Image (cartoon, rainbow, N blue to C red):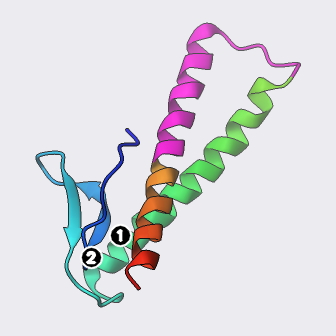
Amino acid sequence: MGETTEAVSGLRRLPWKTDSGKPAFLATDDPNSMLSLMADQIEEQHLTNASTILGLVEPMYGPEARLTAAEAVFMLRRTAESLAAVIDVARMRGERLDSE
């Protein structure tokens, strides 16, 4: 989760991994290719998920919150997963900006 990946010149890193767990890359500069559009949709879904999770957990950590340990661990895991995905999206978009 949240590993650092070096950008590969001329390639777009995709928001999924290969079967062997390595970063997947796309070798096209066509932003309208099927894989580019799919990657855009997945990145957008990661951002939407993060926003949803934030909205769900915000009321859970206020002064009136009464969480069990299991609920707190579950909340923390989902939040961490979401944060890792959003960081990856930011890095991937940064890599694309650097290559322009």
The N terminus sits in image quarter: top left
Determine whether 89 is above or below 69 in the image. Answer: below
Determine whether 51 is above or below 99 in the image. Answer: above
Q: Quadrant of residue 39?
A: bottom left
Magenta-colored segment: predominant secondary structure: helix
Q: What residue is drawn where x is 55% and y is 18%? A: 73
Q: Position of residue 69 (x, y in %)?
A: 61, 9
Give the farthest residue toward the top: 69
Q: Quadrant of residue 83?
A: top right
Q: Which mark is residue 35?
A: 2
Residue 77 within the magenta-colored segment of the rendering: yes
Q: Position of residue 34 (x, y in %)?
A: 27, 82
Q: Position of residue 50 (x, y in %)?
A: 58, 49
Helix, strand or loop under label 1: helix
Q: Amino acid at mark 2?
A: Leu
Q: Position of residue 38 (x, y in %)?
A: 34, 72
Determine whether 5 is above or below 40 in the image. Answer: above
Determine whether 19 is above or below 60 in the image. Answer: below
Q: Quadrant of residue 56?
A: top right
Q: What residue is drawn where x is 36% and y is 87%? A: 31
- Residues at marks 1 and 2 touching, judged by CB atoms closer than 8 Å: yes
Counting every numbered tag in the picture gives 2
Q: Amino acid at mark 1?
A: Ala
Q: Which residues are magenta?
A: 63-84
Give the farthest residue toward the right: 63
Q: Which mark is residue 39?
A: 1
Q: Which mark is residue 15?
A: none
Q: Nearer the viewer, residue 35 or 14?
A: 14
